[in-house]
Image (tube, rainbow, N blue to C red):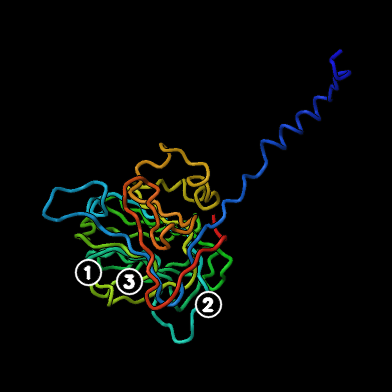
């Protein structure tokens, strides 16, 4: 007998159910999850590489080597009347030849265009299963990989197309942009092709992501965010989650630890943070 009376012995099935309920309980809401860009707002990631110095392996200049992967999860919105150019998800490059760019196809809300070293992968635009850039509630995952020989593009876990390119990129010391495109390299007065919608998460890797992981990554967007481990993030060059409003209102910290922090600019438009996303 215990001082408080008889011990209450619950059936094993009841105990098991209680344990299951605790272990499967959803984590507390994390708050903000994406940044919405409207009418000319964009995000800039500075390339800290000094071309006169040896390669700094923590900078965007690593993209000049022969292996990398880009992941970006985003949602679009109906384009304003008169917009005919392809809005930009991500781009980096010093000119058309050295450019890596991922764009929404303005003429078809289910397709993207990927430009690599002056050519379009697949020769035109690529259709993504389940994608509708006009639907502000439907997030899409785009992945671009390069192994030194072949560029491969995936959308929502599905292989979309590839292109042989043994030359690789030559971005020089160009900065990267999320949500806008350089007309003249690094000239912020000469930007266009602005994104309309929200950017959930951008990951830049210095390895080729395996083809057999694409469906898992699409269906498990929180695998490397809410429950990530330091080892699971290697070798990341940049991780921009947009999961909290910046302390100074504009600086998005690089969660990869490489110091490639991003800065949000309103440009000719506006930006704000939302709870939708992963």
Which image quadrant for residue 4? top right
Looking at the image, do the residues carrying marks 1 and 2 touch, with CB atoms under 8 Å apart?
A: no
Of the residues under marks 1 and 2, which one precedes in the sequence? 2
Of residues 27 and 220, which is closer to you in this image? 27
Cα–Cα span, label 3 and label 1: 11 Å
The answer to which image quadrant residue 170 occupies is bottom left
Residue 66 image position (x, y, % from top left): 25, 50
Q: Nearer the viewer, residue 99 or 154?
A: 99
Q: Secondary structure at mark 1?
A: loop
> Dots 3 and 1: beta carbons under 8 Å?
no
Q: Residue at x 43, y 60 (%)?
A: 160
Residue at x-position 88% and y-position 18%: 6
Q: Is residue 214 visible?
A: yes
Mark 3 / mark 1, whichever is N-terminal? 1
- Which label number is shown at residue 95? 1
Residue 78 badge: 2
Q: Which residue is mark 3?
A: 181
- Using the numbered discs, state the Cα–Cα distance from disc 3 to disc 2 in whole angstroms: 19 Å
Q: Quadrant of residue 265?
A: bottom left
Label 3 neighbourhood size at 10 Å, few (<14), some (14-19), many (20+)?
many
| Residue at left offset 40%, top offset 72% | 266
* Distance CA(mark 1)–CA(mark 2): 29 Å
Compared with 173, 237 (above or below) is: above
Rate crowding at label 2 as few (under 14), some (14 to 19) or many (20 or more) other CA atoms within 10 Å: some
Which residue does the image show at 75% across and 33% down from the upper left? 18
Given residues 153 and 232, the one toward you in this image is 232
Q: How many marks?
A: 3
Q: Position of residue 34 (x, y in %)?
A: 50, 60
Whether residues under marks 3 and 2 lie with C-beta atoms below 8 angstroms apart, the answer is: no
Image coords of residue 38 (percent x, y)? 46, 74
């Amino acid at each position: 007998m215990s001082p408080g009376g008889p011990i209450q012995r619950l059936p094993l099935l009841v105990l098991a159910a209680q344990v299951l309920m605790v272990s499967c309980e959803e984590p507390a809401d994390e708050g903000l999850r994406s940044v919405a860009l409207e009418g000319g707002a964009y995000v800039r990631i500075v390339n800290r590489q000094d071309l006169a110095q040896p390669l700094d392996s923590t900078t965007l200049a690593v993209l000049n080597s022969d292996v990398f992967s880009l992941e970006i999860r985003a949602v679009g919105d109906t384009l304003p009347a008169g917009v005919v150019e392809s809005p930009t998800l991500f781009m980096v490059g010093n000119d058309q030849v050295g450019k890596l760019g991922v764009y929404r196809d303005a003429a078809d809300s289910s397709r993207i265009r990927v430009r690599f070293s002056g050519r379009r992968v697949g020769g035109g635009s690529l259709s993504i299963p389940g994608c509708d850039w006009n639907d502000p509630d439907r997030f899409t995952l785009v992945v671009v990989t390069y192994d030194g020989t072949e560029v491969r593009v995936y959308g929502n876990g599905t292989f979309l197309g590839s292109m042989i390119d043994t030359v690789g990129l030559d971005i020089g010391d160009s900065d990267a942009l999320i949500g806008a495109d350089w007309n003249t390299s690094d000239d912020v007065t000469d930007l266009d092709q602005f994104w309309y919608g929200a950017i959930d998460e951008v990951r830049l890797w210095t390895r080729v992501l395996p083809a057999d992981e694409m469906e898992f990554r699409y269906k498990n967007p929180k695998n490397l965010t809410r429950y990530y481990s330091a080892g699971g993030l290697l070798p990341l060059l940049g991780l921009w989650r947009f999961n909290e409003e910046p302390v100074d209102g504009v600086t998005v910290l690089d969660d990869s630890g490489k110091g490639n922090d991003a800065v949000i600019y309103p440009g000719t438009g506006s930006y704000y943070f939302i709870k939708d996303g992963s």
